[in-house]
Amino acid sequence: MKFNFYFIHGWGFDKTFWNSVKKKVESLDVCENSESLDLKFFSKTKQTKLFFKSDNNIFIVHSYGLNWFLKNDIPCRLLFNFFGAPDFVNYQKKPNIIYRKIAYMHKQLLENPVKVLKNFYETCNVEYSFHEVINIETLRNALIELQRENFSFKFNKLNFPIHTFYSTNDKVLNINKESIDFLDNDNHDISFLNEYDHGFPKTNPEICFELIYKVLEKI
């Protein structure tokens, strides 16, 4: 059986975030098609939906990419979730501090967007790259969504396998394990990595791919 693979990046990145992992997935016999979606944080054009109307769609998302996925009712066979949470703030160890940090970033994006992005990339342990276009309003709107949206109920109702990966070293999404206990159900497998930063899929594509491949081997 072959599958359509879709890659969705997180806040502050673009579709190149997944390039290295995507290339490895495309080498697999089970890959029929692959697309990296761009959420247009650094472009003025709108995202064109390229989803195949198929039960064989596999989505691989990072951070805010999970929120974006949950807002769209998309046919899906399997979901890989790297460092994303259906309630980004309240599943963290210090939700009040995270809420205020997001509010500060939201404000500072109007005054010095490059500084905000550079600080974020540094926290993710990802090298910052210059962007000719910075779509400030799109970035700010996504921060509000991360700050306020709670997709927990919808997430728990998904009826396909989900494999979630978190890291105990993540300085952007510092998960409180007790708060996500109820998300651990028959459809949802949660794994904790020990040493990786929020930019893990970009900075460690080989290890990220191996995690994906181990699941695909069992399909």
Image (spheres, rainbow, N blue to C red):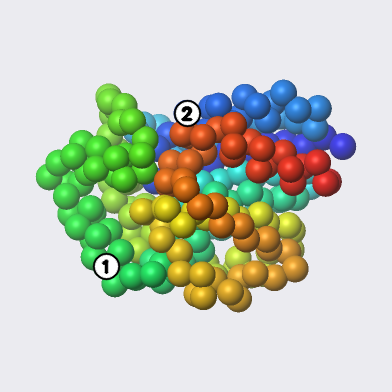
Cα separation between marks 2 and 1: 30 Å
How crowded pointer 1 is (Cα within 10 Å; few <14, some 14-19, many 20+) is rated as few
Residue ID at (54%, 52%)? 193
Q: Earlier in the sequence, mark 2 or mark 1?
A: 2
The answer to whether residue 48 is seen in the rendering is no
* Residue nearest the viewer, comparing 211 with 135: 211
Residue 183, image x and y in percent?
A: 61, 70
Residue ID at (71%, 29%)? 33
Secondary structure of the residue carrying numbered label 2: helix
Vertical position of residue 171 compared to residue 8: above or below: below
For badge 1, the amino acid type reads Ile
Residue ID at (63%, 36%)? 209
Report the residue marked by disc 1.
97
Report the residue marked by disc 2.
16
How crowded pointer 2 is (Cα within 10 Å; few <14, some 14-19, many 20+) is rated as some
Residue ID at (46%, 69%)? 176
What is the residue that sits farthest to the right in this orientation? Answer: 1
Is 7 on the left-hand or right-hand side of 121? Answer: right
Residue 163, image x and y in percent?
A: 66, 54
Front label number (2 vs 1): 1
The answer to the question of whether label 2 and label 1 lie on touching residues, with beta carbons closer than 8 A, is no
Dot label at residue 178: none
* Residue nearest the viewer, comparing 158 with 85: 85
Vertical position of residue 134 compared to residue 171: above or below: above
Is 60 on the left-hand or right-hand side of 102? Answer: right
